[in-house]
Image: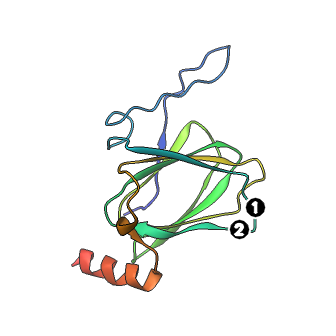
């Protein structure tokens, strides 16, 4: 089973330019409760290194590119996000890392839940133990 859930987003643009619309429970399988974006990053400073117990996300690289590493405790996959018309759905209990940000990268993230520190798993060994328990 692939961890890579790359989806094409509807490009409603015309000769005037691009336009992408993302609707909760239409294009993505959850309600949107939080939106944030990452910018002015350094190529040599990776981010992420955590999983969420319940939260799901859709990541869209609006400009530039970055590389994701996704890990469910049994397998790892890498994907380059580099198009504003594609989104990466990141399920709960998926360890994520973001690497190799281009200088001009703007990464938009839509989240299924409000910020809750208790939902984060920041220790990889703890994540592996929890992932193993969920797989049983």
Q: Which residue is mark 2?
A: 45
**How many residues crowd mark 2 within 10 Å: few (<14), some (14–19), many (20+)?**
few
Position in image of residue 55 (x %, y %): 35, 57
Q: How many marks?
A: 2
Q: Is residue 41 among what the camera can see? A: yes
Position in image of residue 105 (x %, y %): 70, 49
Q: Which residue is mark 1?
A: 42
- Give me the residue at 46% from left, 57% from top: 4
**How many residues crowd mark 1 within 10 Å: few (<14), some (14–19), many (20+)?**
some
Locate the N terminus and report the quarter of the image it occupies.
Answer: bottom left
- Give me the residue at 71% from left, 57% from top: 101
Where residue 54 sits, quadrant-wise, is: bottom left
Q: CA distance from mark 1 to mark 2?
A: 5 Å
Position in image of residue 126 (x %, y %): 39, 83
- Give me the residue at 31% from left, 36% from top: 25
- Give me the residue at 44% from left, 74% from top: 75
- Mark 1 and 2 residues: CB-CB less than 8 Å, in contact? yes
- Mark 1 element type: loop
């Amino acid at each position: 089973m692939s961890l890579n859930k790359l989806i094409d987003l509807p490009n409603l643009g015309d000769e005037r330019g691009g336009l992408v619309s993302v609707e909760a429970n239409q294009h993505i399988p959850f309600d949107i409760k939080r939106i944030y974006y990452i910018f002015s990053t350094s190529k040599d400073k990776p981010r992420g290194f955590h999983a969420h117990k319940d939260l799901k996300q859709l990541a869209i690289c609006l400009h530039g590119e970055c590389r994701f590493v996704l890990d469910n405790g049994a397998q790892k996959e890498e994907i380059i996000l580099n198009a504003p018309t594609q989104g990466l759905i990141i399920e709960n209990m998926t360890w994520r890392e973001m690497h190799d940000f281009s200088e001009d990268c703007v990464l938009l993230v839509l989240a299924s839940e409000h910020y809750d520190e208790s939902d984060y798993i920041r220790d990889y060994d703890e994540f592996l133990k929890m992932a193993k328990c969920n797989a049983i």
